[in-house]
Amino acid sequence: MAAIKDFIGYIFSQFRGVADVADIIIVSIIVYFVIKFIRDRRASRLATGVIFIIALLVISESAGMRAMNFLFSNIVQAGLIAVIVVFQPELRSALEKVGGSPIKRFSFFDIKNQSVKHDLISNICQTASELSQEYTGALIVLERSTPLGDIIKTGTVINADPNVLLMKNVFFNKAPLHDGAMIIRGSRVYAAGCILPLSTNDDIIKDLGTRHRAAIGMSENSDAVIVVVSEETGTISVAVDGQLRRNFDYNTLKAELSQLMHDDSDNKRKTK
């Protein structure tokens, strides 16, 4: 019992107060997000090799193996540069998301009228549902905290009120803007015909075409929510954070978008 008390006393004696506690919490959070970043991306394949090389470096240094230590020290130094170059898109995406304000997480935060948010989501879901029945492809990007100005520049600015007829006309297969993506900014259809970055993830199933790969790529490079309608199958999908969820209908899509955009207008109406 005395040994346990001595051990606990020793642990507490190592703390200098609030600064140490804050230090441990911050480091833990950083480590958590680093692990999550690696796990959710193709960097996970590289993690095992990096850990193995670092382990060999530690062993060689502890055992006094100077030749091996020299070799792996240079590999680690060159490897850090290589990792930055190879995973530049993923690192850029992570830094952009870290730079987003945690308080003003979504651009929908600016829309004070709950009915405006509700109507916008309803129009998007109705458009996707009708295009799905007609087997017309569509790509709708809902901007959140990551600004999509670079993407908007690749298309044509519309800046119009959202309605089903307008959005369907944009994606009509004879329309000049139908091949690109539509950008929803705030409560407006802001641009159309925009070009999205394609995902380079090798794990994407081969059945998915360019439209779906572009949706996944956009979600990898920003925190946007992307709604995709397949031209071949009519399937409605949603891409978020590099992941693609499929087989939505009007009701399930509306519930998904309401949750992702933190829209609580539906819940308020149900409780009345």
Image (cartoon, helix red, strand yellow):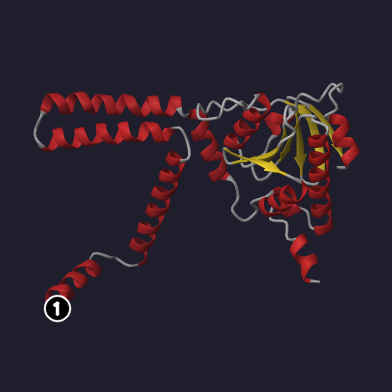
Compare residues 67 and 20 and report the one nearer the observer: 67
Residue 177 in the image: state x and y as whole percent: 82, 24
Residue 53 in the image: state x and y as whole percent: 25, 31
Residue 180's quadrant in the figure?
top right
Disc 1 packing (10 Å; few <14; some 14–19; many ≥20): few
Q: Is residue 113 visible?
A: no
Residue shown at 38%/54% (left/top)?
Answer: 28
Location of residue 111 with respect to 39 vertically, above or below: below
**Which residue is farthest right?**
165
Locate the C terminus and report the quarter of the image it occupies: bottom right
Location of residue 93 with respect to 103 vertically, above or below: above
Residue 149's quadrant in the figure?
top right
| Residue identifier under label 1 | 1
Residue shown at 61%/33% (left/top)?
Answer: 216
SS at mark 1 in the image: loop
Residue shown at 82%/31% (left/top)?
Answer: 157
78 sits to left or right of 125 = left
Residue 147's quadrant in the figure?
top right
Q: Is residue 103 visible?
A: yes
Locate the N terminus and report the quarter of the image it occupies: bottom left
Circle 1: residue type = Met
Residue shown at 9%/33% (left/top)?
Answer: 64
151 sits to left or right of 202 = right
Compare residues 241 and 245 and report the one nearer the observer: 245
Residue 164 in the image: state x and y as whole percent: 87, 41
**Which residue is farthest left?**
64
Residue 91 in the image: state x and y as whole percent: 49, 34
